Image: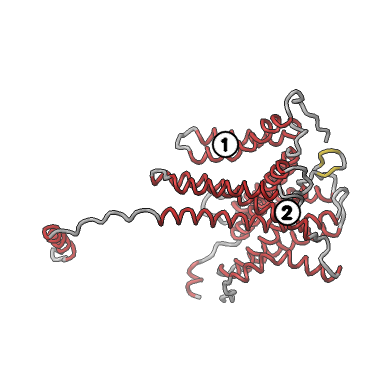
């Protein structure tokens, strides 16, 4: 891919801020706006803002080629197609089965399997064929080494965990658990192939190195997220603990007690029936 | 006939989750006699950077949630200030630790470059995590909906 910028007159930092970081922040802001605002037209506006952010991030290799961060935009543009195919395929497979609401025609199942399969083959083609995301010819996008091992490893881990959960919690879920074991086994096979078979640009040794970096990355994400959640819980706990006791009300008077007992006796007797 | 069911334990769940990387390690040890391709220094740097970035970004996200939590309670300032301080602590710790030297600098020349790289790296990793979770959950759901409808009375009789 030949990438040439078209904002040469601007300072590089300002260019990266305007054409990469603002679009990046538009995505969560748009989603937040679409979900939180009580106005009826705001969901559409919020979704449009998020969509515009995604498009601008995907265009960042052309708008801010000088910024190393734009490689992430390039990766997003490269993987958005296969990922959407996989998601849509899974959606079609799921809702053409036995669901209570939103059931799709049975024929959608075959289309779903085809779409999900093409999506996975497309991603695999980025490792072992000519589809590898490249910023300049023969230079692999560095973030592809982050995305691909993390995705394959975590899919295998989660599918294995899901299979065992189905066996432990579900009633007569052996067939479903077997399907999940097969998915986990397939992902693991792709992982092993990546560790042993070179692609045209992605070498097995590089993949192996990045696989262990992905493990370190995932462990770091878990530790960091758990720490922040603990801090959050601590802040809420300290605030709630320091709140003053609610004001006590005066006990009921004799007349109030009499009125209550009259009301109760009128409702629990059942004499009139 | 009723199928025998495994007993639920967290250890079993954790083991099932960790099985793939443990298998890769076992295969490596069998065929190469050691841990091939693991550089503990580089892995630690990545782990530390990921921890600091995840803490800071997750705190920022929770700070937003806290803002809405306060809406139903006359928006108290105390927890908001507490969480702002916790987030600021994450930012300061990141800047301080990266600035200590090459320990947390991956192929980047300055603190700012490393901090920006950490955020982008975290966004890409989070994207991969989201896609993997969607695939695993989606396939589980489609495996369940693919089965024939059940007769609940049969289950009760068993």
- Locate residue A85, reporting x and y percent: 69, 46
Say whether residue A110 is visible. Answer: no
Q: Quadrant of the N terminus of chain A?
A: top right
Give the side of residue A218 with respect to residue B106, left or right.
left
Query: Where, by quadrant of the figure, is residue A227 drawn?
Result: bottom right
Q: CA distance from mark 1 to mark 2?
A: 34 Å
Q: Are both tags, 1 and 2, on one chain?
A: no
Q: What residue did someone put label 2 on?
A: B46
- Locate residue A127, reporting x and y percent: 81, 50
Q: Quadrant of the C terminus of chain A?
A: bottom left
Residue at 67% over, 66% down: A178
Residue at 55% over, 62% down: B149
Q: Is residue A38 above or below residue B32?
A: above
The secondary element bearing badge 1 is classed as: helix
- Locate residue A272, reporting x and y percent: 13, 63
The secondary element bearing badge 2 is classed as: helix
For this orientation, the residue located farthest to the top is A9
Residue at 80% over, 29% down: A4
Q: Is residue B11 above or below residue B112?
A: below
Q: Nearer the viewer, residue B28 or B64?
A: B64
- Chain that bears disc 1: A
Give the side of residue A34 with respect to residue A1, left or right.
left
- Chain that bears disc 2: B
Q: What residue did someone put label 1 on?
A: A47
Residue at 58% over, 49% down: B89
Q: Nearer the viewer, mark 1 or mark 2?
A: 2
Q: Are marks 1 and 2 in contact (CB under 8 Å)?
A: no
């Amino acid at each position: 891919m030949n990438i040439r910028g078209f904002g040469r007159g601007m300072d590089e930092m300002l260019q990266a801020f305007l054409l990469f970081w603002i679009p990046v922040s538009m995505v969560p802001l748009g989603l937040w706006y679409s979900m939180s605002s009580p106005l009826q037209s705001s969901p559409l506006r919020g979704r449009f803002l998020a969509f515009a952010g995604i498009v601008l991030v995907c265009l960042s290799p052309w708008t801010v080629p000088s910024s190393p961060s734009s490689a992430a935009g390039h990766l997003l543009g490269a993987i958005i197609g296969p990922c959407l195919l996989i998601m849509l395929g899974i959606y079609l497979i799921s809702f053409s089965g036995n669901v209570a609401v939103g059931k799709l025609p049975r024929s959608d199942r075959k289309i779903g399997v085809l779409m999900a399969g093409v999506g996975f083959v497309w991603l695999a083609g980025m490792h072992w064929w000519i589809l590898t995301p490249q910023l300049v010819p023969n230079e692999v996008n560095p973030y592809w080494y982050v995305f691909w091992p993390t995705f394959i490893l975590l899919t295998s881990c989660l599918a294995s965990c899901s299979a065992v959960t189905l066996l432990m919690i579900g009633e007569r879920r052996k067939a479903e658990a077997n399907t999940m074991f097969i998915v986990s086994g397939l992902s693991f096979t792709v992982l092993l192939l990546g560790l042993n078979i070179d692609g045209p640009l992605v070498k097995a040794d590089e993949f192996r190195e990045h696989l262990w970096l992905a493990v370190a990355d995932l462990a770091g994400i878990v530790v960091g997220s758990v720490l922040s959640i603990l801090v959050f819980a601590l802040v809420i706990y300290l605030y709630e603990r320091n709140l003053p006791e609610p004001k006590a009300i005066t006990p009921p008077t004799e007349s109030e007690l009499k009125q209550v007992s009259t009301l109760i006796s009128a409702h629990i007797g059942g004499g009139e029936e | 006939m009723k199928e025998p069911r495994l007993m639920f334990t967290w250890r079993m769940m954790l083991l099932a989750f960790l099985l793939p990387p443990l298998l890769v390690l076992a295969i490596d040890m069998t065929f190469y006699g050691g841990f091939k391709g693991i550089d503990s220094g580089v892995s630690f740097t990545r782990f530390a950077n990921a921890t600091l970035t995840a803490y800071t970004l997750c705190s920022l996200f929770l700070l937003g949630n806290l803002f809405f939590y306060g809406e139903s309670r006359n928006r108290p300032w105390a927890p908001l200030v507490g969480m702002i301080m916790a987030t600021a602590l994450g930012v300061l710790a990141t800047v301080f630790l990266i600035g200590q030297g090459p320990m947390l600098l991956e192929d980047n020349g300055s603190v700012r470059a490393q901090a920006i790289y950490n955020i982008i790296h975290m966004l890409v990793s989070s994207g991969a995590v989201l896609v993997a979770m969607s695939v695993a959950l989606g396939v589980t759901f489609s495996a369940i909906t693919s089965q024939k409808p059940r007769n609940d009375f049969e289950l009760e009789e068993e």
